[in-house]
Image (cartoon, rainbow, N blue to C red):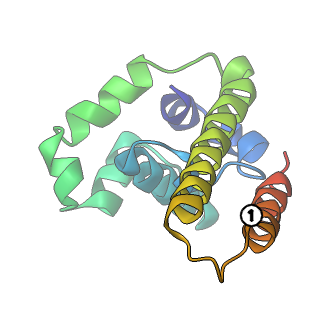
Amino acid sequence: MILGAILINNRTLYNINEFLLPEHFYEPLHGKIYKSINLIISKGISATVISLKNMLGNEPSFEEIGRVDYLAKLTTLALSIVNANEYGKIVYDLALRRYLIEIAEKIATNAYSSTLADTAISQIETAESQLYDLGQEEL
């Protein structure tokens, strides 16, 4: 897992934080962990299991999964640091696919529920705009 790779070697973060954001993680807790790692490192502190435990504190979702034990498990599941950038790109790509599905669902919902005053052309223009905006999310 990419989070474990970052905890093992904090320099791994510099290869992926240019394109990978906390909201790109499917699991919200992983996004919070990633955001916390970024914050810790930006303060010049080493991101470790202990510093993360202190940062996440009483986060309910963190407590539910076992706190330090979960963070330790992330480090044991860590990817090779060499592969971390590629895995970051996979996480990013999957996030874009989820956003694409959301847009497609909105397009279908609007097409089924719109009135005649909301023309098909205006719906197409809205869809094009949303897809264009998503397409600007490049690595």
Instruction: Please tell me in which quadrant of the rendered image residue 92 appears.
Output: top right
Task: Characterize the local packing of mark 1: few (<14), some (14-19) or many (20 or more) Cα atoms within 10 angstroms.
Answer: some
- Residue 86 horizontal side relative to residue 40, left or right: right
Asked if residue 45 shows in the view, the reply is no
Q: Amino acid at mark 1?
A: Gln
Work out whether 21 lies above or below 97. below
The residue at 46%/51% (across/down) is 31
Work out whether 109 lies above or below 88. below
The residue at 59%/60% (across/down) is 111
List the residue tagged with mark 1.
130
- Residue 16 horizontal side relative to residue 3, left or right: right
Q: Position of residue 80 (x, y in %)?
A: 63, 16
The residue at 74%/30% (across/down) is 85
Q: Position of residue 115 (x, y in %)?
A: 56, 77
- Residue 125 horizontal side relative to residue 40, left or right: right
Frontmost residue, 128 versus 72: 128
Q: Position of residue 138 (x, y in %)?
A: 85, 49
Work out whether 7 lies above or below 62. above
Asked if residue 86 shows in the view, the reply is yes
Frontmost residue, 10 versus 2: 2
Q: Secondary structure at mark 1?
A: helix
Instruction: Please tell me in which quadrant of the rendered image residue 139 appears.
Output: top right
In this view, the residue farthest toward the front is 116
Work out whether 126 lies above or below 40. below
